[in-house]
Image (cartoon, rainbow, N blue to C red):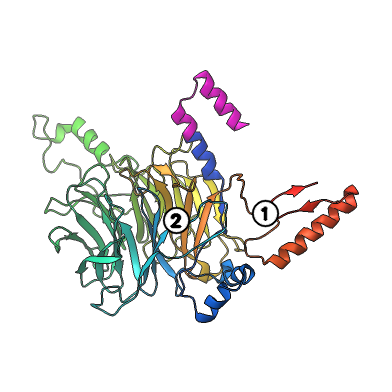
Amino acid sequence: MQAQARLLSRETGDATCQDIIKSFNADLVRAFAPAPQHRFNGEASSTAAAAAASASLRDESLHERAQQIRAHGPGVSSLALDKFDGRILVSGGSDGSIKIWDLEEALSPHQRHTFRPVSSIARSPPGGGGHSHGITHLAFYPFDADAFLSSAYDKTLKLWAVQHCSLSAEFDLNATIYSHAMSPVAAHVLVACATQHSNVRLVDLKSGSAVQALVSHGGPVLCASWSPRHEHILASGHADGKVRIWDVRRAGGVVAQLDQEDSLGVVHRYRHAMATAGSGDGHGAMTATAMPRFRQAAQAHDEAVNALQWTDDGKFIVSAGLDSKIRVWDAGTGANTLASFGAVIQNNHAKTATMVVTPSGLLGPPSRELVVWPNDQEIVVLDLHQGNVVTRLRSPGSSGGNHPRGNVRSRITAIVWRGCGGGIGHTGSVMGGANALGAIYSAHLDGQIRAWMPKVPGPEDVDELEGPDEDEEAKRRKRKAVDSAYRSLMGRQITFTGRSSSA
């Protein structure tokens, strides 16, 4: 009914083509569901498994049941997905290994497919090329899908070439790197590294050295994010609950701090002070003492800030803290927009978290931008400005997002949004890729990478009666039972094939 109304609006000229696309995208987001037909198997096949795989399709199906497949045996700790073609997925393991996957191997989002890594980087001892400890963060180079950066608990930052899986550069910062970020608009090639120390380290890929440290006194830095509008503006999230705004050209340090108690913003207060400049120098000019400044004690969150991201139009900053709050800030004024997400957010682990903010022009009203947040056992999609829940994604068989005794091993450690078309944001400006209308991929402590896709009708849908992990014998029994039921009800034989039914 909604689709017909859209088409009517389009024909009558009441809606533009872009309006129709945004409306369809909004429907697709609400249709996201688990996609167990797509699985990621990164474990090396044993001799017995290889022999079984060549024996028969039935044996292969039994061998690769979804609950047994692992992308990384010890656990998956990080993911990155290129935003240009939406094709290359990179995963990092708790053991320090890195694997590269080609998402276009699957011809259709409806068909069952088990992905195998197209290349991999094994864990290696210090100085051996790969990482020697668990991966902490992965990110593609913002201007080229053929390069990505990785950091690990071995205190190194490495630059890799995707095509040959070769090491291009390596930086030892002598500090654990929790996350890293590059500007999507800058001419410089500075990598901002959030480290265990209280400063943000800037690494220049061009000169090959750590050129600067942005010094603060707030404990470890857990996250950092560059402005997509101003190439020298950087935001960092700290263990003391503060979000600091830096201009990396200035030697004076912090230029602003976000304040959860400020719903007006530093810029508004400055303009108000200018308008009432009677306390100035007698000529209407502000004196140094009259200039408003941010509060040194200002905090963005009551606990550590472990996730931070700008919207791709640069108008808002989104932060998340261990106080289980997500806050949205006006990037122009620094004001807290007071968006409330209720008690749905879980954020209890003292590590850098990943969240996704959808591109600004992707959706139409009322939900122009969404934030995708990984709770322990579920993915929650929320309206960025209203705070209401758009949809909740739970794995089949999970106990739900707020269950205190959920399966710890299946806890989500990272998520990525599949988009293409490039752009200045963290994700592509168009939903999905060449073979999918859209997708979210989640990394889990149990070693799995799970796929989530819009559930739309397709000619090759997996039969609802047949789970993707059932063997052929179980499927035959189900078909036989359904055949018998229909024969008894309708008095004539109806035979069901694997995909469709006929009288």
Is 6 placed left or right of 78 in the picture?
right
The amino acid pointed to by label 2 is: Leu
Badge 1, how many Cα within 10 Å: few under 14, some, many 20+? few
Residue 303 drawn at (x, y percent): 37, 61
Determine the residue positioned at 58% across, 72% down. 63
Above or below, comparing residue 292 to residue 299 in the picture: above
Instruction: Report how far apart the C-alphas of labels 2 and 1 lie in the structure.
Output: 23 Å
Which mark, by number, is residue 501? Answer: none
Q: Is residue 65 visible?
A: yes
The amino acid pointed to by label 1 is: Asp
Determine the residue positioned at 47% across, 53% down. 440
Residue 84 drawn at (x, y percent): 35, 48
Mark 2, secondary structure of its residue: helix
Residue 463 drawn at (x, y percent): 67, 54
Above or below, comparing residue 334 to residue 300 in the picture: above
Residue 36 drawn at (x, y percent): 57, 59
Is 228 placed left or right of 493 in the picture?
left
In the rendered image, the quadrant that contains the N terminus is top right
Along the viewing direction, whichever of 161 and 302 lies nearer the viewer: 161
- Kindly identify which residue carries mark 1: 463
The answer to which of marks 2 and 1 sits earlier in the sequence is 2
**Quarter residue 359 falls in:** top left
Q: Residue furthest front?
A: 55
Mark 1, secondary structure of its residue: loop
Q: Is residue 10 magenta?
A: yes
**Quarter residue 180 falls in:** bottom left
Q: Which residues are magenta?
A: 1-21
**Magenta region, main secondary structure:** helix
Q: Residue furthest top?
A: 12
Badge 2, how many Cα within 10 Å: few under 14, some, many 20+? many
Q: Is residue 342 visible?
A: no
- Kindly identify which residue carries mark 2: 103
